[in-house]
Image (cartoon, helix red, strand yellow):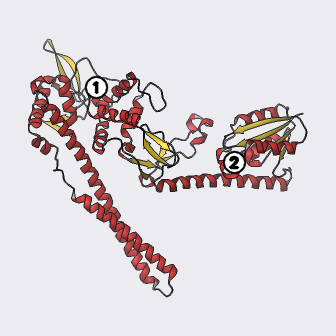
Amino acid sequence: MPTAIYVRVSTEDQAKHGYSIPDQIRQCRTKAGETDIWEYVDEGVSGEFLDRPALLRLRQDVHDGLIDTVVCYDPDRLSRKLAHSLLVAEEIEKRARLVFVNGEFAKTPEGMLFYQMRGAVAEFEKAKITERMASGRRQKARQGKVVRDFQIYGYRYDKETAQLRVHEEEAAVVRLIFDLFTKPSAAAQGINGIANHLTRQGIPTKKHVGVWHRQVVRQILHNPAYIGELYQNRWNAEGMLGNPFRNEDEKIHLKARPRSEWIYTPCPAIVEEAQWRYAQQLLTTSRRRWAGQSRHEYLLSGLVRCADCGNTMTGRRAKNWGRFVYEYTCVKNTAGAKHKGCGHRLICEDLDGQIWQQMQAWLTAPEELATAINEEPLQTPYEQDEWERVCRDIERNERGQQRLLALVTEEDGLDLGDIRDKLKELKAHRAQGEARKVELETILAAQAERDGSRQTVQEAVEHYLAVHPEELTEGQRREILRMVVREIRVYKDGRVDVFTF
């Protein structure tokens, strides 16, 4: 009967041990001698799982009695997990003889102990290799290097420098996506509209397919890499490698790590920060702002909310005293609606006229609009200078702690009590500094959002003043409104609150 040779190699094995398929086959053939040999080869497959093509065929052939001897280079080639290795070995030993090039395996108490120890060491080594590789990637990221090609649209990965480089053709598409989203036009409205527009234009995706999906556009709009902020070590994918071999309810899903574990890495920016932050504001309301386009173009579609029940108010045509009118209502007739609404209704013509009149007053007097959105004059904020001072203070504090620790190890006869007190004082001062830093960063982020709003307001004013107000089309009025207004809340007593970005 033929003798089977089982060999396996994964990328990490090649890097760590220098294993290679030809070398394993050569040594296994030498061990097997001059016999009829069948080769079972798993190349580039992890030893963590049993569902490997060649191993499955080997186990089936052994079960069918086609093989009387199995030769393997080392126990960890069968599996990197002790339990799996013992299972396969027992399965083979029931119908054939199992032989290892790197050590003999005898079914004696001593032989079983040796085999189990080898399996335990292999499993431990696998865990250590995984940890070392992860630690190495984190260290590279902290040094400002990009640890792998993240396949970000608009960039190319430079392996030699471990950095991202702007791909100008794709970067132009990224800028187009942000422009279409933050400055709506007839070409495309909303995320779905942008995806359809890119598809119609024949613009290829990152994978060079001709169809854009709305989720791809949304991911691009969300990605902070486009303002030069790449975050590595953000996702925990531990255990996901085995998902193809698990049942649906046992699969491990991608999980976000705590933000404190993210590693910030600068990269070239493609869009302006103010435009990116404005896009984030729009994304929070994009679903209702652009969903469900109807035959009648409602001026305030997606912007109106009932202040009494909290439902959004959608436009509809209703019959009133024998004639049809258009109105906004909070009533939801769709199946599964969480809240049916309180029955609040408003004539579209009345609310549209009121809101547009307010917009005209703001757009012809921009200083009033600045007051309405609580804008501050452009200047270098005090908080920015304070943040830089706090950062310098934290750095000095850290250097002070390091000097004290160095004194403890280098000098004899020091008063350790005084040093402990000083270290305690430095740590308390640093904790205060870190808390102040977080507080200032929150203020600065809000300031950046206001700066984005200021730019958007200026664009709306310029857009409005570039044409005669009476010549504005309904679509142009809708566009200007969405550049300024975030939400309109209406009350049953007639009050109306307008919230801007």
Amino acid on which the number 2 mark rests in the picture = Lys
Instruction: Residue under label 1, please give it.
Output: 332
Residue sitting at x 37%, y 75%: 425
Query: Spatial distance from mark 2 to mark 1, Cα to Cα?
Result: 56 Å
Q: Where is residue 346 shown, x and y percent of the image? A: 16, 26
Split into 4 quadrants, where in the image is the N terminus?
Answer: top right
Residue sitting at x 36%, y 44%: 269
Q: Where is residue 390 shown, x and y percent of the image? A: 31, 64
Q: Where is residue 270 shown, x and y percent of the image? A: 35, 41
Left or right position of 366 against 35: left
Neighbours of disc 2 within 10 Å: few (<14), some (14-19), many (20+): many
Residue farthest toward the top in the current orientation of the protein: 322
Split into 4 quadrants, where in the image is the C terminus?
Answer: top left
Query: Do we see residue 308 in this rendering?
Result: no
Marker disc for residue 81: 2
The secondary element bearing badge 1 is classed as loop
Q: Where is residue 58 shown, x and y percent of the image? A: 78, 35
Q: In this orientation, which residue lies closer to the viewer: 412 or 243?
A: 412
Q: Quadrant of residue 321?
A: top left
Residue sitting at x 21%, y 56%: 381
Q: Quadrant of residue 453?
A: top left
Q: In this orientation, which residue lies closer to the viewer: 338 or 354?
A: 354
**Mark nearer the viewer, 2 or 1:** 2
Amino acid on which the number 1 mark rests in the picture = Lys
The secondary element bearing badge 2 is classed as loop
- Answer above or below: position of 300 versus 87: above
- Answer above or below: position of 34 versus 266: above
Marker disc for residue 408: none
Q: Quadrant of residue 470?
A: top left
Circles 2 and 1, Cβ within 8 Å, touching? The answer is no
Q: In this orientation, which residue lies closer to the viewer: 8 or 82?
A: 8
Say whether disc 2 or disc 1 marks the residue closer to the N-terminus: 2
